[in-house]
Amino acid sequence: MKFTEMEYIRPDKEKVIKDIARETERLANAGSFEEADSALEEYERVCGEFESMCTIANIRHDMDTADSFYSDEVDYLDMAVPEIQEYIHGWNRQLCRTKYRTEFEKKYGGLLFTNIEIELKTFSPEIISDIQRENALVTEYDKLLASAQIEFDGGVYTLSQLGPFKSDPESGKRKRTWQAEGQFYNSVRDRLDEIFDELVRVRDTMAKKMGYPDYTQLGYYRMNRNCYDSGDVDKFREAVKKYVVPVAEELYARQAERTGRSLPLNYADAALKFIQGNPKPVGTPLDILNNGRKFYHELSAETGEFIDFMMENELFDVLSRKGKAGGGYCTDIPKYKSPFIFANFNGTSGDVEVITHEAGHAFAAFLARNVFPPELRSPTMEACEVHSMSMEFLAWPWAESFFGSDADRFRLAHLADAVTFIPYGTMVDEFQHIIYKNPGMTPERRCDVWKELTGIYMPWLTLDREIPFYCDGRAWQRQIHIYQVPFYYIDYCLAQTMALQIWAVMQEDREKAWRIYMAYTSQAGRNTFTDAVKNSGLVSPFEESALARVCGTAEKWLSENG
């Protein structure tokens, strides 16, 4: 079904609660496994319908944040979801203690219960009002950024539309773009501080009500970390500092030499990869989508079927426009077994990465669309990011279709960005650990922490006083994940380590790389991240050798091809 044809009906909160409570009672009183399993099926139908309405409302709100109907619906759902969550929590509690647990585990696997037991550690009726407030604050943050109307060189732009000018080859124009963007963020900096300050306090309050010393452990549980902990992440961070930061600094030194600069670079100069300008996709947004369709048809039969489904059902919204929420994502509409891709094309190489990165997520969802129960369709988020980041590399042989004569420069920039991103992403993660261990920090101190971490993870960068907002250590406030989903960002770094392994295999055997990708992705959510990695023949990112190896391989390729 086409997205425009998917009907939205406001969920009746009381009916959803009643239906979930009814199935929970059926499960508790089941006289056979078959009856208990039937209750599970009906529970999943009820939740799938509710989740689908929530997803449709949020997508349509993001398409136009000024649409009063869907704005009201999102506000309603922000309040309703935590109340319904109490009854979902009750269902999960009953499922974990059912006398038919052995039979459920035999049919669906033990990971289902591992994940549910983690989820049970994330919720209590005591924190419903806190979750409601958290939702409202995140929505306000999204709307605040979507409201940007930035005057620049005679035009008016959203944050996404301003993007291409931030890497303009002409240094004066490039710097003025960063200044214009920084001025917008500065104009709302007080509210950004207030929103985040309250988010930290609300999350810390939730954690303490749940019996945790601070938000960190609760945050890990909310991210469903089921196979590693903060100690493993600490080790990964140390390996990043040891192996990745030096390579990244060397890559930026080469970039500076190519562009007639020297280290350290300010934000504006760091954005320019080549003196003649960064690689840009050729053609219109429709051309990019059509080239993406060609790529997926030539990659495999499975991806060909997938992209036809997406195109024929209009499951993309990729054009930037006034009032549209920023960023990009892939989500899933369970009722229709349909992924949906939301993005903001702006004429940069990021447009192609949407059709590869976000479509990598969508392809994984498409492959798993018939997995039951739905909780096993998707693995944890770091595992999901392997689907997307690896797909970016798998598209390399088709780079000429997307970039024309810029294809080789795109490959150079893409690989360098993959390596240099890891220190930045790891810095975001360490920043959040520090913040939530110290919830009483002032806004000024948080910015000081960001500056200190920048010196450790991004020593090639200088905070130019001529670029407002950024010079004050406030760049973290434009990183949406920090506001929306605490502790998410390390997932990208772990996944990038895996994607670089698949890229390395590609250099020798493209067909083998695809087999590894499919072996990994076809596991859906039936295995933990570390088990999925092992099952597909890759090396865990928590092993120091993984980062050492991929950095060495990438640096060698870039030296030979740059």
Image: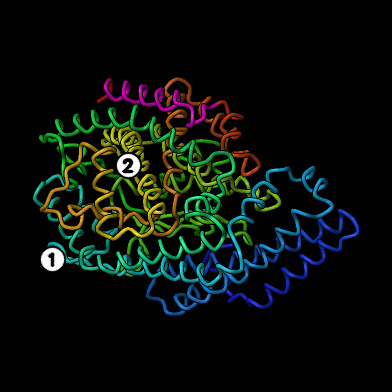
**Numbered-mark total:** 2
Residue type (three-letter) at the residue carrying disc 2:
Tyr
Residue nearest the observer in this picture, 182 or 543: 543
Q: Residue at x 41, y 50 (%)?
A: 289
Asked if the magenta segment contains residue 545, the reply would be yes
Residue nearest the observer in this picture, 18 or 200: 200
Image vertical order of residue 28 relative to residue 374, above or below: below
- Disc 2: which residue: 424
Rendered-image quadrant of the C terminus: top left
Q: Position of residue 389 (x, y in %)?
A: 44, 40
Residue type (three-letter) at the residue carrying disc 1:
Gly
- Disc 1: which residue: 154
* Quarter assignment of residue 102: top right
Residue nearest the observer in this picture, 145 or 285: 145
Badge 1: few (under 14), some or many (20 or more) residues near its Cα, within 10 Å?
Answer: few
Q: Is 244 situated left or right of 377 in this image? A: left
* Quarter assignment of residue 31: bottom right
Residue at disc 1, secondary structure: loop
